[in-house]
Image: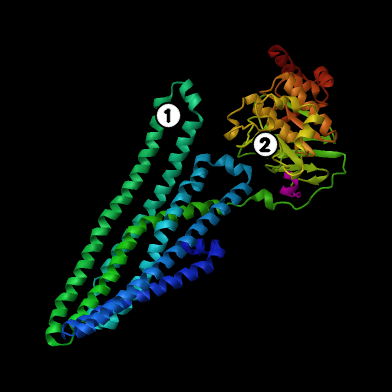
Amino acid sequence: MKENTFLRSFKLVPEVHRPFFFASMVAMVGTGVRMIGPQLISRGIDNGVMQYDYQYLLVQCLFYFLTLVVLYFVTSKALLSIGLVGESYVKSIREKLFRHMSSLDINYFEKNKTGVLVARMTSDMQSLNEFAREGASSILTSLLTIFGATIAVFLVDVQLSLLSFLILPLLGIATKIFRNHADKTYWSVREWIGQVLSSLQEGISGVRIIQAYADESKQLKRFKEVNNEHLKANMQSAKNIAIYFPFLEITRVTSIAVVIWFAAARIEQGTLTVGELVALLFYLNYFFDPLIQLSFNYDLLRSAGSSMKKVFSILDEEPVLSKTGTLSPKLDSNSVIKFENVEFSYGRETVLHDVSFSIDRGEKIAIVGETGAGKSTIAKLILRFYLPNKGDVKFYGESSKDISQKWARKNIAYVPQESFLFRGSIRDNLIYSNPEKIDLKSELENIGLIDWFERYEDGLEQDVGERGANVSAGERQFIALLRAVLARRQIIVFDEATANLDIESESSILDATDTLLDYQTSVVIAHRLETILNAEKILVMSEGKLVGFDNHETLLANNEIYQQLFSAWNLVN
């Protein structure tokens, strides 16, 4: 049986249960105090106004004033408490979502649009935040007031109470219909918000390409189509509200009119006092006004519910790789990486076919091949971003299926082709992997690279901006490469990571690697000739198959595919 969204949402953050219970108790006290007011007014009318006893009326007025003062302080405390619970809840959800997303496998991010995932952390969190700030306290106090008013109405007069509530079944049917339509609409609104943000992010990220190909009008057309769908979903939501709210007001007025009609006869008969009628009308307003308020807040409620469903759709994703394997291999084996008859596919099409090779401690291996040959896939398997469909990848003699993800992250460094720098200084990015254990200046002096950074105005404290916006592509790549070297991992994978470097900078990084980590095993997806010649062995891939694995001289003499690749590189260089 599928668990209710709001019940599951409540269970998700157990640390707010106690504060929520306290806030509810305070709100309940406030509701009780509010229910006293009409009774004081009723007595003031019947025993004061009707009996011309103005002293009694004055006493009731003073009591009423005191209830208002108490109500002010209790309500303020309740609103503050509920608001604090709501904000704490959203903060906790945001952290849980971010933590969970960080733990998911790489293939999840490759299958889902970045803009949609960003929407979960921005738009959906904003929806929850609005509900926590504005809707939660209103809904809780409204529900308590409706409950208290219902009891109070029957305590005043059972017959008139039953008459006033005769119309409620019709109101219930209308509310049910409204909810069914609203649920679908709010889900659609949240979905299209994600699509809008995704389209917007794509347009901003690719603005250089869009302008270079004069594609602004076509891109705008795509964005308009998505934006129009978002508008349609919002307009459907507005239509639902426009139909339901007037019906709710008509119900309220009709119910009060029925009570007044029959109460007039009861007053004439002497079975009902004027004060009791006034109290009854107050309680009926206490009943219907919160209903109207709930309807106004239903937008926030359903929007928050739809957002939580979106959040749960991510939280329900299981990080397979982090739960597969618990071993931490000992680093005493000479065989560091071993592929045994590995086959792999991202979907239906197999991209690696029966690949077998072994890399020993300290070896520097280059992987070459045409586009689509399977080079990056091998890198991803070494990084344990994926597990092979068939065969096995072993690290220090242990299967990748058995080793822990934590071990892989602590022992394998990675530098992608598109280098990523975090907002902050050059120093922050260089010591990112080990901020407390790296004496950065000494390390850079030892490997002869300190001068490279002193050319900046602020040296190592130079700000790189978001995604490295303040430095060139080559400088970003150099910093990212050095960050991986300083991480001192046992294995380092370069996925065409020297593409934007000049020969001198690439040579400096390779020398730094030799100086710092003579034991390190390096795997480089080769982009140019210099990288290949520096490798001790070269792995040659063609159409997902391993067609050669030896040193440069042997491959150049005996491997036809390598000869063709090398000839092409020679022509380029």
Q: Which quadrant, please, contains the C terminus?
A: top right
Depth check: give the residue in front, 223 or 462: 462
Question: Contact, CB < 8 Å: mark 1 with mark 2?
Answer: no
* Mark 1 nearby-residue class (10 Å; few <14, some 14–19, many ≥20): some
In front here: 235 or 281? 281
Q: Nearer the viewer, mark 1 or mark 2?
A: 2
Tell me if residue 221 can be seen: yes
Residue 219: numbered disc: 1
Identify the residue position indicated by label 2 in the image.
429
Q: Quadrant of residue 551?
A: top right
Q: Is residue 26 left or right of residue 339?
A: left
Task: Kindly identify the residue that appears in the image at 76 percent across and 19 percent down.
Answer: 530
Q: Is residue 73 magenta?
A: no
Q: Could you tell me the amino acid type at mark 2?
A: Asn
Q: CA distance from mark 1 to mark 2?
A: 35 Å
Q: Quadrant of residue 543?
A: top right
Q: Is residue 408 magenta?
A: yes
- Residue at 43% x, 46% y is 191
Location of residue 82 with respect to 388 vertically, above or below:
below
- Report the front residue among 569 and 147: 147
The single residue placed furthest to the top in the displayed view is: 571
Q: Which residues are magenta?
A: 401-409
The image shows residue 531 at horizontal and vertical percentages of 76, 23
Q: Residue at x 70, y 44 (%)?
A: 387
User: Is 124 left or right of 356, judged from the image as shown?
Assistant: left
**Is the residue 158 above or below the residue 437 in the image?**
below
Other-residue count near label 2 (Cα within 10 Å), few / some / many at <14 / 14–19 / ≥20: many
